[in-house]
C-alpha cells in the first residue's frame, strides 16, 4: 500500500515487467556469464584440480607474470593492437570521409570491397594472408622486435579498418551539413572546418572505432594463427597452445587479465563519450 | 549533397588513395592468389602450378568432404535457430525496457561480445569437461542422493560423468554461446526502430499479444531477423575455434579441414578451393539477403 | 528610391541537372531593407538565398554585393552571414565559443573577441549565457545564439533561412516583433526566406514572391495584398475569390468586366491597361465583400459608387465558420459557385446576424476588386 505504483499491473508494452520475460532474461544472463565468472573465480582458487574451492591465492598470477613466453606474447599482442588501431583509425576515417563527402565513379565498388573484410570468413582471410606472406612478400622473421610483427600487424589492419570505416561513416551520417555551412559562412576554410567542426563531431565514432579495432586485434586468433611464427606468437595464440593440452589455473589467470583489460577499455570508452560510443559500436553488429 | 570528386581532385586523391591502396594490396591481392591457387595443383613440394584445373573443386564434393560441408551447414543452421529462439525474447525485453535499464541490458549482451573468443570458448571447456563444473555439480547431487538412499539400504552406483565435451553437442552449444550477442543486437536494432503505436494500434483493435507479434512485429522486423540470421549463420559455418576446441574427431567443420590442408596436409590448392567454396556460400547468403531487402523496399513503395 | 542598392541578382539562373531551380531572376535589394523571399516549398527561394551565401554557384548570371561580383567567391570570403534553418549551433562549443567562432577565424584577438561576443549576446538578450552548452538551451535560445553568431561579424547582409519555422506558434509571434526591432537596432540589411505569408507580411519591408523558379512580384506587403499582379500571388497571399471574365468596357477612369459566374457585371473605378480581348480574372478578397439581408423580398443594397445592377449578386449561406474575431461565410451563388466572405464580429451579437441557408446579397465597392491579366 505504501508504494501503489509497485502494485500497478504492467502496461501492455512493459514486457520487462512480465515474469516469463524476466525469467528468460535471467536464464540467458546465467548462460552468458556463468562460464566467464567461474573462470575468473577459479583463477584465485588454491587448487590445481580447479574444481573445489580450496582458498584464495594469487599464485597463478605470479606464475603468469613469471612465464616469459606468456609475457612476450602479451607484449606482442599489445604492440600489434596499438599499431593496428592507429593505422585502422586513420584509414577508416579517410574511407568514411571519402564516402561521405564525394560522389565518384566506382563508389559502389569501393563500398562492396569495404564490406568484404567483414563478411569473408576468418579462416579464408587467414589462409590468404598465410599464402601472401610466404609466397608474395615473405616477411623476414629475423627482423628486430617489433618489426618482425609486421605481417600480423598488416593482416590486422586489413580486417579492422573496414569496421572502423563503418562506425565512423555511421557517425558522419548524423552530421548536420548546415554546421559545416555555418562554419564556412563564418569564414572558416577547409582545414579549419575539418579541425573545428568535423573531427569534434566524429570524435565518438573515432573513439568507438579505435576501441573496436583494438579489441578486434587483441581478440583475433584465427588470422593471427596463420600469420604468426614461432617467435611472433600473440597472447591468444599462446593461450591456445596451452588450452589444447588442459585446463589449468594459469590459463584462467591469464584469461582473467585479458577480460579485465577488455572490460576496463570498454568502461573507459563509455565513460569518455557516454552512450554515443556504445551506440556507434552497437551499430556495427 | 555529395561533392563531385572532380571539383577537388587533390583532396579526393589524398583521402581515397591510402585506404584503396591498402584494401587492394593487403586484402584483394591475397584473396586473389588463393582464388588462383584453387585452380592449380602441387607441381613439387613448394611449387604450385596454376593450370586452370577444376580437380580441387571436384575433390571437394566427394562424399567425405561434402559430408563435412553439409554438417557445417547443419551445425550453423541449428545454432542460428537456437540463437533466434533464445535471442528474440531478449531483444523484445531490451526494446521495451525503460531507457536506463535498456542501456544496462545492452551492456549485458555486449560485454561477452567484447570478450576474447578464445577465452569464452575456453570457459566453456572448463564448464563442460568431465571434471567440469556441470559434472561436478551433478556428481555432488548424485552422491548426496546416494547417501540418502544408502541410509535406506539402497546405495547407488558410482557416478559416471556425462561426456559433454568433444562431441557435436558441445560444438553447437559453444556456437550458440559465442554467437548469441550477434543475433540479439540486430534484432534489437530492428525492433527499436519499430513504431510503438503500431503495436498499440494492433492491441487497440483487439489483437492479443501473440497475434500482435505474429501479424505485426514479426513482419515488420523481418529485415532485422534476416540480418540477424546472416550475421549468425556466416561466422558459424566458417567457425574454426569452437569445433577445434570443443568438438571431437567426428565434429570437424569446413574451417578445420581448410586449416589442415594448409598447415599439415600441405595441399594448398585443395585448401584454396575449399576456402572459396566457403566464400561463395557466404556471398550467396548475402545476395539472398540483399534481394529480400530490395523486394521488401520495392513492395513498400 | 534614394537608398543604395546593396545586393543585385542579374539574370541569375540555377539548374540542378535538368531541374531549373531559379529561372532568370533579376532583383535588387537596398541598404537597410528587411526583405522577404516568399514562396511555396520548391519555388527556388532557398536556392536564391544559398547562392547569395555562396553555397551554390549560379549556372548563369551574376550576383553583386556592393557592386562587386561575388558569383565565384567562396562563402567564407563573402560579407554576408546566415542564420540556418536548423540554427546549426555547434553542439560541442559553448555559446560564447559559438558566437566568437567567426571572429576567431578572422584572427580577432581574444580580448576584443570576448567584448564583442558579450555585446552580441546582449543584443539578442542572452547576457550571461556565454558559458552554456547548446544542449542546455531551448530552441528559441539557440536561434538567438545563431543570430548573435552571425551579427557579431557585422555582415553587410544577414541571411535568415526560414527563421521561425522551427518555433512553436506563441514564440513565433514574439520572435516576429523581436526580429523587426533587432533589425532596426543594428541597421543591417536582413534577407529572409519563408513559405509563411503571415510572417513575410508582418516583418518585411519588401517581399519577393517566387513560384517555380520565377520571380512573380516584388512589392511592399500591402501592395502584394491589395495589388497582386497575378492569380498566383493573389491566391498565395491571403485568401481570394477569383472569377474568370472578359472586359465589357475599359475606359481611362472606369471599367466593367462580365464574369459568367456572377449574375451582374463587375464595375471598377479605374481603367486597366492591356487584356482588352483576352480572358481576365477578377480577384475579390473575402473581407471586401459585404453581406446584406435578402429575406422577405429585401431589395439589393446600393453602395453608391457603382451604377445600379453592378457589384451586387444574390446567394444563400451554405456554411459558417465561427473563428472568434471573425466569421467566414460560404455563400452559394445562383450559378452554383461558392464565394467566401468574411465579417468581423464587432459586437458579441454579430455572429447571430446571419444563419445557415439564409438568402443574402453580396456587394462590394468599385475600388475593391483587382483585375488580373495572368
Image (cartoon, helix red, strand yellow):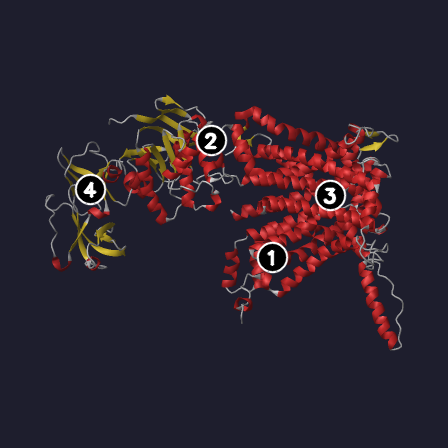
Which residue carries the number 1 mark? Answer: B92
Q: Quadrant of residue B141?
A: bottom right
Q: Is residue C373 left or right of residue B105?
A: left
Camera-nearest label, 4 or 1: 1
Which residue carries the number 4 mark? Answer: C369
Dot 3 falls on a residue whose secondary structure is: helix
Q: Residues within 10 Å of mark 1 (few under 14, many from 20)?
A: many
User: Label 1, label 2: how many angstroms apart (C-alpha)?
Assistant: 53 Å
> Measured from the top left, where is residue B63 in percent x and y?
83, 47
Label 4–label 2 contact, CB within 8 A: no
> Measured from the top left, where is residue B41 in percent x and y?
83, 33
Q: Are marks 2 and 3 on the same chain?
A: no
> Measured from the top left, where is residue A208 in percent x and y?
63, 42
Q: Are marks 4 and 1 on the same chain?
A: no
Q: In what quadrant of the picture does the N terminus of chain C appear?
A: top left
User: Label 3, label 4: how many angstroms apart (C-alpha)?
Assistant: 81 Å
Camera-nearest label, 4 or 2: 2
Rendered image: mark on residue A219: 3
Looking at this view, is C343 or A178 the one in front? A178
Q: Residues within 10 Å of mark 3 (few under 14, many from 20)?
A: many
Rendered image: mark on residue C110: 2
Q: Are marks 1 and 2 on the same chain?
A: no
Amino acid at each position: 500500500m505504501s508504494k501503489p505504483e509497485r502494485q500497478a499491473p504492467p502496461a501492455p508494452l512493459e514486457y520487462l515487467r512480465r515474469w516469463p520475460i524476466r525469467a528468460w532474461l535471467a536464464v540467458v544472463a546465467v548462460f552468458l556469464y556463468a562460464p566467464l565468472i567461474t573462470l575468473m573465480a577459479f583463477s584465485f582458487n588454491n587448487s590445481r584440480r580447479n574444481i573445489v574451492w580450496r582458498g584464495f591465492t594469487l599464485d597463478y598470477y605470479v606464475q603468469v607474470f613469471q612465464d616469459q613466453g606468456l609475457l612476450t606474447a602479451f607484449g606482442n599482442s599489445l604492440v600489434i593492437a596499438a599499431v593496428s588501431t592507429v593505422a585502422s583509425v586513420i584509414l577508416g576515417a579517410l574511407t568514411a570521409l571519402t564516402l561521405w563527402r564525394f560522389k565518384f565513379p566506382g563508389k559502389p565498388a569501393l563500398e562492396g570491397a569495404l564490406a568484404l573484410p567483414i563478411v569473408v570468413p576468418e579462416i579464408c582471410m587467414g589462409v590468404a594472408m598465410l599464402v601472401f606472406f610466404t609466397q608474395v612478400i615473405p616477411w623476414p622473421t629475423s627482423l628486430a622486435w617489433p618489426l618482425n610483427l609486421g605481417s600480423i600487424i598488416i593482416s590486422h589492419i586489413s580486417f579492422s579498418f573496414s569496421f572502423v570505416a563503418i562506425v565512423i561513416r555511421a557517425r558522419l551520417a548524423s552530421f548536420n551539413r548546415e554546421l559545416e555551412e555555418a562554419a564556412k559562412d563564418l569564414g572558416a576554410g577547409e582545414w579549419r572546418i575539418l579541425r573545428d567542426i568535423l573531427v569534434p563531431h566524429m570524435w565518438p565514432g573515432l573513439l568507438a572505432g579505435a576501441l573496436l579495432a583494438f579489441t578486434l586485434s587483441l581478440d583475433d586468433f584465427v588470422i593471427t594463427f596463420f600469420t604468426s611464427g614461432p617467435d611472433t606468437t600473440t597472447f591468444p595464440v599462446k593461450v591456445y597452445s596451452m588450452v589444447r593440452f588442459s585446463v589449468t589455473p594459469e590459463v584462467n589467470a591469464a584469461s582473467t587479465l585479458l577480460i579485465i583489460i577488455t572490460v576496463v577499455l570498454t568502461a573507459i570508452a563509455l565513460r569518455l563519450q557516454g552512450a554515443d560510443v556504445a551506440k556507434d559500436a552497437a551499430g556495427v553488429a | 549533397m555529395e561533392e563531385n570528386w572532380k571539383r577537388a581532385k587533390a583532396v579526393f586523391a589524398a583521402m581515397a588513395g591510402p585506404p584503396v591502396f591498402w584494401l587492394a594490396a593487403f586484402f584483394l591481392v591475397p584473396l586473389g592468389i588463393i582464388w588462383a591457387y584453387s585452380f592449380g595443383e602441387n607441381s613439387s613440394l613448394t611449387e604450385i602450378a596454376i593450370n586452370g584445373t577444376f580437380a580441387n573443386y571436384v575433390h571437394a564434393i566427394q562424399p567425405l568432404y561434402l559430408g563435412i560441408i553439409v554438417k557445417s551447414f547443419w551445425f550453423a543452421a541449428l545454432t542460428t535457430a537456437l540463437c533466434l529462439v533464445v535471442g528474440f525474447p531478449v531483444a523484445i525485453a531490451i526494446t521495451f525496457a525503460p531507457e536506463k535499464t535498456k542501456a544496462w541490458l545492452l551492456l549485458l549482451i555486449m560485454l561477452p561480445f567484447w570478450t576474447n573468443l578464445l577465452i569464452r570458448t575456453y570457459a566453456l571447456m572448463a564448464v563442460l569437461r568431465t571434471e567440469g563444473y556441470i559434472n561436478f555439480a551433478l556428481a555432488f547431487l548424485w552422491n548426496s542422493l546416494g547417501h540418502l538412499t544408502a541410509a535406506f539400504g539402497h546405495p547407488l552406483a558410482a557416478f559416471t560423468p556425462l561426456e559433454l565435451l568433444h562431441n557435436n553437442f558441445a560444438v553447437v552449444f559453444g556456437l550458440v554461446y559465442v554467437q548469441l550477442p550477434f543475433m540479439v543486437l540486430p534484432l534489437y536494432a530492428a525492433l527499436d526502430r519499430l513504431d510503438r503505436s503500431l503495436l498499440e494500434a494492433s492491441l487497440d483493435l483487439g489483437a492479443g499479444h501473440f497475434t500482435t507479434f505474429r501479424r505485426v512485429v514479426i513482419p515488420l522486423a523481418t529485415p532485422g531477423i534476416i540480418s540477424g540470421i546472416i550475421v549468425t549463420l556466416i561466422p558459424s559455418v566458417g567457425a574454426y575455434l569452437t569445433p577445434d576446441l570443443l568438438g571431437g574427431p567426428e565434429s570437424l567443420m569446413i574451417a578445420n579441414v581448410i586449416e589442415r590442408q594448409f598447415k599439415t596436409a600441405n595441399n594448398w590448392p585443395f585448401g584454396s578451393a575449399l576456402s572459396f567454396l566457403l566464400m561463395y556460400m557466404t556471398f550467396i547468403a548475402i545476395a539472398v539477403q540483399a534481394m529480400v531487402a530490395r523486394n521488401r523496399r520495392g513492395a513498400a513503395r | 528610391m534614394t537608398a543604395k542598392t546593396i545586393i543585385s541578382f542579374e539574370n541569375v539562373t540555377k539548374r540542378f541537372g535538368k531541374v531549373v531551380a531559379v529561372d532568370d531572376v533579376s532583383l535588387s535589394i537596398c541598404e537597410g531593407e528587411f526583405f522577404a523571399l516568399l514562396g511555396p516549398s520548391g519555388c527556388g527561394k532557398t536556392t536564391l538565398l544559398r547562392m547569395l551565401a555562396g553555397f551554390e554557384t549560379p549556372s548563369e548570371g551574376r550576383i553583386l554585393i556592393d557592386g562587386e561580383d561575388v558569383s565565384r567567391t567562396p562563402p567564407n570570403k563573402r560579407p554576408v552571414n546566415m542564420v540556418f534553418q536548423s540554427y546549426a549551433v555547434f553542439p560541442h562549443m559553448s555559446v560564447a565559443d559559438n558566437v566568437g567562432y567567426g571572429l576567431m577565424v578572422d584572427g580577432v584577438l581574444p580580448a576584443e573577441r570576448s567584448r564583442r561576443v558579450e555585446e552580441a549576446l546582449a543584443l539578442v538578450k542572452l547576457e550571461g549565457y556565454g558559458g552554456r552548452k547548446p544542449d542546455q538551451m531551448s530552441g528559441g535560445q539557440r536561434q538567438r545564439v545563431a543570430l548573435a553568431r552571425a551579427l557579431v561579424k557585422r555582415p553587410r547582409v544577414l541571411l535568415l533561412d526560414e527563421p521561425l519555422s522551427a518555433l512553436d506558434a506563441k514564440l513565433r509571434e514574439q520572435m516576429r516583433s523581436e526580429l523587426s526591432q533587432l533589425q532596426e537596432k543594428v541597421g543591417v540589411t536582413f534577407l529572409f526566406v519563408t513559405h509563411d505569408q503571415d510572417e513575410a507580411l508582418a516583418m518585411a519591408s519588401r517581399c519577393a514572391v517566387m513560384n517555380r523558379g520565377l520571380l512573380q512580384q516584388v512589392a511592399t506587403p500591402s501592395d502584394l495584398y491589395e495589388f497582386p499582379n497575378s492569380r498566383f500571388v493573389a491566391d498565395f497571399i491571403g485568401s481570394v475569390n477569383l472569377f474568370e471574365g472578359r472586359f465589357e468596357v475599359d475606359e481611362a477612369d472606369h471599367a466593367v468586366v462580365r464574369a459568367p459566374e456572377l449574375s451582374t457585371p463587375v464595375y471598377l473605378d479605374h481603367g486597366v491597361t492591356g487584356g482588352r480581348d483576352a480572358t481576365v480574372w477578377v480577384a475579390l478578397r473575402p473581407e471586401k465583400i459585404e453581406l446584406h439581408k435578402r429575406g422577405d423580398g429585401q431589395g439589393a443594397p446600393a453602395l453608391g459608387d457603382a451604377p445600379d445592377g453592378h457589384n451586387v449578386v444574390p446567394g444563400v449561406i451554405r456554411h459558417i465558420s465561427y473563428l472568434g474575431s471573425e466569421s467566414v461565410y460560404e455563400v452559394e451563388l445562383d450559378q452554383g459557385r461558392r464565394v467566401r466572405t468574411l465579417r468581423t464580429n464587432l459586437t458579441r451579437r454579430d455572429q447571430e446576424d446571419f444563419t445557415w441557408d439564409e438568402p443574402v446579397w453580396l456587394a462590394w465597392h468599385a475600388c475593391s476588386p483587382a483585375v488580373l491579366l495572368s
